[in-house]
Amino acid sequence: MRLKKIVFSVALSCIFSGAALAQTTELGVNAGAAGYIGDINPNNLFKPSGVAFGAYVKRNFNPYWAVGIHYNYGKIKGDDANSDDLSLKTRNLNFSTSLNELSLQVDFNFLDYFSGGGRKNFTPYIFAGVGGVLFNPKATYEGETNELRYYKTEGEKYKNYAISIPYGIGMKYRIGERLGIFTQLGYRTAKTDYLDDVGDRYPLTDPARGKVSAAHSDGFNLSDPSITPDPNHPNFPPGGQRGNFVKNDTYFFVHIGLSYTFTSDKCYSF
């Protein structure tokens, strides 16, 4: 009788909680657009500027909480020439860079949801986490593209990687027994001010710093490419403010994606 009670209890456990325990591993892919907020785009919080795509593997602990490892790739850019601010147009800086991000993220679903089960077919959700991003800003002038980090445009050489803090919102929908679709908007605070190569001030010393003399006969200067009517009275003098006063750049991904949840109908065996 004791053995029968144990078997019966385990069977009930499988019936009522087995689905939630089994539906744990989720794979997903996504694609969309990337954008950036920083010294060359200080005000527009949602301005996509390039493509983005990614993938993840996630463990669902229950219908509400999940933890995943995410990889995202994106391209961002900015150009003072497109600004409505006359001072930024005069500054005449531009950049573009690819982003390679790896992060650990925690999801919270507001409703009882799995892409492979749960009582709801959809749920809004939020996420946050921590990660790292690789970047390499480049600028194009007079038809040539240069990797800005090597020209020390503000007098210092910065690292091409940084810690990133992802956070955002989204919506998930179940479209099949194990398939789901989702859409999300996620921002990242990057612990660097140099995604765009612009962060502080024009260099005080070494007027050759930032010049591309090998490629341009006029010694084109990537530190200060502004067009100055009088070279003796520059628009942006040495030591003057080059970027804004916000010390961390921000980038974002807007995605739509497809998820697949691995399930198992197996219970305990004796």
Image (tube, grey):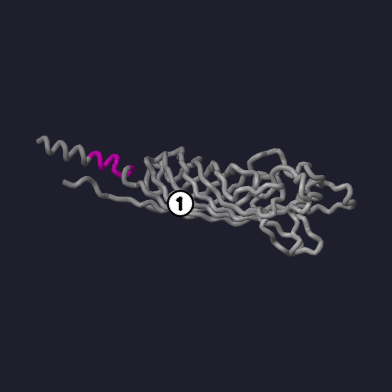
Tell me where residue 83 appears, x and y as whole percent: 76, 49
Residue 41 appears in the rendering: no
17 in magenta: yes
Tell me where residue 214 appears, x and y as whole percent: 74, 64
Disc 1 secondary structure class = strand
Left or right of residue 260, residue 7 in this image: left
Residue at 33% of width from left, 42% of height from top?
A: 20
Q: Amino acid at mark 1?
A: Tyr
Residue at 62% of width from left, 54% of height from top?
A: 136
Quadrant where the N terminus sits is top left
Tell me where residue 111 appears, x and y as whole percent: 44, 39
Of residues 14 and 200, the one drawn nearer to the viewer in this rendering: 200
Residue tagged 1: 56
Left or right of residue 171, residue 93 in this image: right
Residue at 30% of width from left, 40% of height from top?
A: 17
Left or right of residue 81, residue 157 in this image: left
Tell me where the magenta segment starts and ends, as one range: 12-20
126 is higher (above) or lower (below) than 98 = above
Tell me where residue 217 appears, x and y as whole percent: 80, 64
